[in-house]
Amino acid sequence: QKVVLATGNPGKVKELASLLSDFGLDIVAQTELGVDSVEETGLTFVENALIKARHAAKVTGLPAIADDSGISVDALGGAPGIYSARYAGVDANDQQNLDKLLDAMKDVPAEKRQAQFNCVLVYMRHENDPTPLIFHGIWHGVLSTEMHGEGGFGYDPIFFVPELNCTAAQLTKEQKNQHSHRGKALKLMLDALKNA
Ligand code: ITT
């Protein structure tokens, strides 16, 4: 079964595609099928994931999987949250977003630097699927004051995981998937598809 992976983010593709393929899905990236990006007008991770999956399903005629995710910082009232990709502006890159977050947190002491990654994955069978499957994963951590590690993407170099005593960017792809918001949502999705 061909399924379009409705994301333009190579970091997400790296973490999702091989596990979905191992599961037996014939995963095609949306860029390979000429799917453009769609405006994310939702107010929740769930709404934005649905918007992206529906758009890709509509353009391709295939089932679609979308990921909407972001980092929520307690000391910032949950910001940047659903705006994580556009925190430093609509055309901002990962480094600019990360620098802005470090700057916003520069006076916040160690004990008040808790943050969470959220990931919502959606599986939409077709454009008009009235019961899309929705899965949520969360990962708790603490924002570091400096970048560490070369792996992962986005905010990973400043997302310190106390249980593992390192940042998300210091984990291998496999280790990150064992602990991450995305890995947890993906496991729930694969369990559900197995039983479908
Ligand atoms: P698509 O919409 O095309 O999937 P995007 O990058 O715009 O790509 P989002 O709107 O979901 O995706 O934004 C996610 C943001 O949260 C983005 O800035 C990421 O860097 C960040 N993020 C999500 N998961 C992350 C992870 O595992 N590690 C680090 N940063 C992450």
Image (spheres, rainbow, N blue to C red):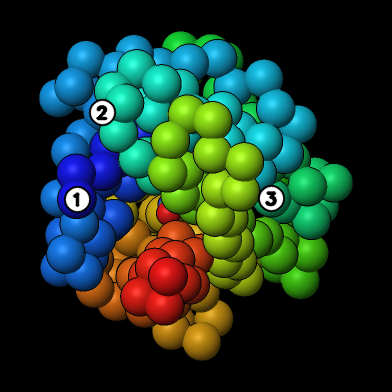
* Direction from residue 10 to residue 32 in the image, left or right: left
Q: Residues within 10 Å of mark 2 (few under 14, many from 20)?
A: many
The residue under the point 21% across, 15% down is 34
> Spatial distance from mark 3 to mark 2, Cα to Cα?
27 Å
Secondary structure at badge 3 equals strand
Which residue is labeled 3 in the image?
72
In the figure, residue 176 lies in which quadrant?
bottom left
Disc 2, ligand 1: is the CB inside 8 Å? yes
Q: Which residue was labeled with disc 2?
A: 30
Look at label 3 and name its amino acid: Ser
Q: Amino acid at mark 2?
A: Gln
Work out whether mark 3 precedes mark 2 in sequence or the reverse, and give the earlier one.
Answer: 2
Q: Looking at the picture, tell me which residue is in the foreground, 137 or 122.
A: 122
Visible residue check, residue 116: yes
As drawn, the residue found furthest toward the bottom would be: 163
For the residues labelled 1 and 3, say whether their Cβ atoms are less than 8 Å apart: no
Query: Residue at the spot x=71%, y=64% of the render?
Result: 114
Q: Is residue 93 visible?
A: no
Callout in the foreground (1, 3):
1
Residue 80 is drawn in which quadrant?
top right
- Give the mark nearer the N terminus: 1 vs 3: 1
x, y (%) of residue 86? 56, 23
Q: What element does badge 2 sit on?
A: helix
